[in-house]
Image (spheres, helix red, strand yellow):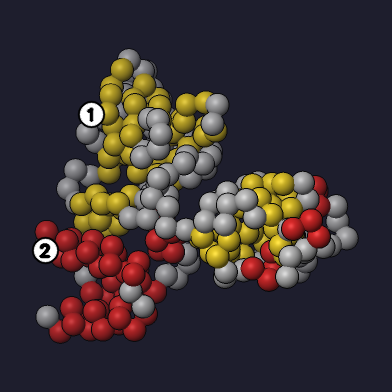
Amino acid sequence: MAAEGGALPAEELVGQVVLPGDVLVLPSHPEADGERLRLGPTAGLPGRLVCGPGLRRCGSGLLVTKCGLLRHRPAGGAGAGGAYWVDSQQKRYVPVKGDHVIGIVTIKAGDIFKVDVGGSEQATLSYLAFEGATKRNRPNVQVGDLIYGQFIVANKDMEPEMVCIDSSGRANGMGVIGHEGLLFKVSLGLIRKLLTPNCEIIQELGQLYPFEIVFGMNGRIWVKAKTIQQTLIVANILEACEHMTAEQRTQAFAKLSES
């Protein structure tokens, strides 16, 4: 049932398809809506509601900006809150501040690198944005290298900017990814699914072969197993998992285990 003014209650639509232009009414709580609604990684804070991908703040509610299934993650601990977002099969990536992505170095110009991240424009990366980098000790980065980093600037009015260090200046797993291995692309929805804690797909794959894997929020995955054949099998399974049920996935893993 539609709420006042044609808006729809967000709680009742979780798990259902929403369309661009739909306005969602948030559950009413004693706090003022303007103080509760936040854009960013504050879903763990009690009473904070986070507006995730596919949604935009609209007065005291949320405006749907892309088609997909409405999802909700409750906040930990006591109190209301959590995060709302739209789960879609979108493949075009829009840079978001704080996202960890896999990019490809396309240009090496002076003190900066240009990195293709799959968005509408390339991101910039300073040679000083690496752990231990100085004017004398420059990182060994070449055109064509794969870079795993995060955005520190990402909005519609400015060129995206990446770094390969965290807030304490440590690489923390970021930097140039090895030349070996395979890079492939999947939908953004599958990436979010694979990055969920204790993802069954990754656990089941780990029981088949030992492998290294890097996930980028821009839909790119880099994987490297012991042999080229095993690398291709892992990549093919990850691509197919998007359209497989849990039962079909179990059967596929069973066949691979036997072989």
Regarding mark 1 in the picture, which secondary structure is present there?
A: loop
CA gap, disc 2 to disc 1? 27 Å
In percent of the image, x 85 and y 52: which residue is there?
32
Residue lying farthest to the top in this orientation: 110
In percent of the image, x 69 and y 68: which residue is there?
11
**Residue 211 rendering spot, x and y as whole percentages:** 24, 62
Image height of 79 relative to 125, above or below: below
Specify which label sits upstream in the sequence, 2 or 1. Answer: 1
**Residue 12 rendering spot, x and y as whole percentages:** 68, 71
Residue 236 placement, left or right of 161: left
**Residue 58 rendering spot, x and y as whole percentages:** 72, 46
In percent of the image, x 24 and y 36: which residue is there?
145
Q: Would you say residue 134 is visible in this rendering?
A: yes
Q: Looking at the picture, tell me which residue is in the foreground, 75 or 93.
A: 93
Q: Looking at the picture, tell me which residue is in the foreground, 115 or 59.
A: 59
Tag of residue 244: none
Q: Looking at the picture, tell me which residue is in the foreground, 205 or 242.
A: 242
Residue lying farthest to the right in this orientation: 30
Image height of 86 relative to 252, above or below: above
Tag 1: residue type?
A: Val
Q: Quadrant of the N terminus?
A: bottom right
In percent of the image, x 40 and y 30: which residue is there?
121
Residue 112 placement, left or right of 153: left
Quadrant of res 149: top left
Regarding mark 2 in the picture, which secondary structure is present there?
A: helix
**Residue 7 rendering spot, x and y as whole percentages:** 73, 58
Q: Would you say residue 174 is visible in this rendering?
A: no
For label 1, count other residues whose C-alpha is less than 10 Å away and answer few (under 14), some (14-19) or many (20+): few
Tag 2: residue type?
A: Gln
- Return the residue at label 2: 229
- Return the residue at label 1: 143
